Image (cartoon, rainbow, N blue to C red):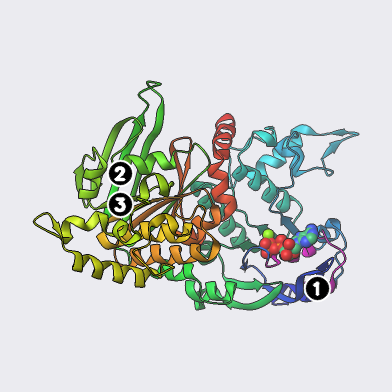
Amino acid sequence: MGGNEYIVEMRSIVKDFGGVRAVDHVDLFVRKGEVHGLVGENGAGKSTLMKILGGVYSDYEGEIFIDGVKVRIRSPKDAIAAGIAVIHQELNLVPQLSVAENIFLGREPTKGIFVDFAKMFNMAKELLSPFDPSIDPRARISELSVGKQQLVEIARALSLKARVIVMDEPTSALTEAEVEKLFDVIRRLKATGTTIIYITHKLREVFTITDRVTVMRDGKVVGTVRTADVDHRTLARMMVGRDIEAVEKGAKRLGNIILRVRNLSVISREAYGKYILSNINFAVRSGEVVGIFGLMGAGRTELLMTLFGSPPGIVKGEIEIGGKQVRIRSPIEAIRHGIGLVTEDRKASGLILMMAAGHNATLPILPSLSVMQFIHRRREREVIKWLWERLQIVPPNPEMPAQNLSGGNQQKVVLAKWLAMRPKLLLLDEPTRGVDVGARAEIHKLIRQMAEDGTGVIFASSELPEVLTLADRILVMHSGQLVHELRADEATEEEVMFYASGAHTFEQHDSEATN
Ligand code: ADP
Ligand code: MG
């Protein structure tokens, strides 16, 4: 014992759920004292594999060796006996009990026939203090932030003398600061010889904290590599099995900051004092696609309208375009500053339905096509021809009134307007609402092409998958505030939804209560 290189060996593990093979002949070799990343897209089988190691599922095929000794893990108890603690995605604490009671549940120190509370609180304090001395062992779990609850789980694992701690997507509900803290804790655990298996699908975390990484896809292991030997792109390709757009998005060069918003607020005129938008700060670079996600009433449309010079109230704060502070008092001024807007309701303001689709497209650039008030028809036709080819609008007849086109093609015409104008900043509100799937992909491609040509894009969407696939960066809004910002290639639906739903505000209250 002890001479083995690997603390955990899982060999040819298979686990089915009904007809679905969640884990398919998986081999996993984890070295002693390393932080071993387990990565893969949602549904890859990561959690299931670790639930097998943690004794949640006993009906698996294959063999498990712990420190060279073959074990059959049939229950969480067996896992604990083998020195394995799993901190599941859904934490496993009793909210009504104290921190100390959760750590020592079922193993409380006793004095005679009674629980020795004083001793238990002291033991808990001792376990927790290296990680967070501010956690009161007497506090109820329900009063703690998720970050602190995780530390309690880690303390419990250590009290169980776990040699291997599995953390399943531990950062999905953590703030940036809590993530940093968790990484410190992991480094400390590693320094004392504890082995960590760290599940994530966020590449940044893989590169920050892991020594080696095993990639899973569709229930199988794609490979195990030293983290230092791979780059972002390689790992992403291993995860999804092809080059993904997200990687190309990340690799793209961004230009200068074209829009910066400082402490932007909009105050209602009707209900005076009510903030429709409050204290919004962000910047957008040329070539960047920024997605704004929020639920109903979050303020997405209001933000776009404000940037386009038609705010729904009184504007406070600063807007800079290309480094210069500007006041945008009307849509005409917005267009002069190089800002375009595609509204949610194409029919209301995006298109003149009776007019030929081609003329619709060239409306914003008419000034540049005009010579002394007369529109240069030949040049207009050339522009339209170029646009129609580029956008593949169907049917390819610019003379057709816009109203006769399908929703998706109408939206392309709206985009064509701005493509012709080459705005510095393009604002899109729900760019693919009511558009069929095929046209949706084409519109996404078009938006990305415009970004590649140097336009900065901000789009608002209530559809999370659209935000995740189209954006480089995501701004999450909740009740008029910008509550979270994250890179799309590192974002999960859970994380975005957590902030969009305002769940973080409850959590802040929780941690305030205990601090
Ligand atoms: P990951 O953690 O990598 O996101 P999971 O291990 O949770 O993946 O899931 C792997 C596959 O197994 C998925 O197809 C999932 O739908 C399926 N699966 C997971 N848990 C169950 C379950 N309890 N019942 C049925 N299917 C499940
Ligand atoms: Mg999982």
What percent of the width, then of the height, locates residue 379? 19, 68
The residue that disc 3 covers is 340
Between disc 3 and disc 2, whose residue precedes? 2
The residue that disc 2 covers is 308
Q: For residue 329, which numbered disc appears in the image?
A: none
Residue 461 in the figure: left or right of residue 324: right
Res 42 visible: yes
Q: CA distance from mark 1 to mark 2?
A: 56 Å
Q: Is residue 45 magenta?
A: yes
Label 2 environment density (alpha carbons within 10 Å; few <14, some 14–19, many ≥20) = many
Query: Is residue 303 placed above or below 40 in the rendered structure?
Result: above
Element at label 2:
loop
Q: Amino acid at mark 2?
A: Phe
Q: CA distance from mark 1 to mark 3?
A: 54 Å
Element at label 1:
strand
Q: Does the beta carbon at disc 3 come under 8 Å from ligand 1?
A: no
Residue range corresponding to the magenta coloring: 44-66
Query: Is residue 386 placed above or below 289 in the rendered structure?
Result: below
Please name whichever residue, 76 or 118, is drawn nearer the observer in this view of the structure: 76
- Say which residue appears at 39% left-offset and 57% top-offset: 402
Query: Is residue 407 placed above or below 109 in the rendered structure?
Result: below
What percent of the width, then of the height, locates residue 305? 35, 41
- Say which residue appears at 23% left-offset and 37% top-offset: 329
What percent of the width, then of the height, locates residue 300? 43, 42
Residue 479 in the figure: left or right of residue 386: right
Please name whichever residue, 68 or 13, is drawn nearer the observer in this view of the structure: 13
Between disc 1 and disc 3, whose residue precedes? 1
The residue that disc 1 covers is 14
Residue 199 in the figure: left or right of residue 342: right
Quadrant observed for ligand 2 in the rendered image: bottom right
**Displayed quadrant of residue 254:** bottom left
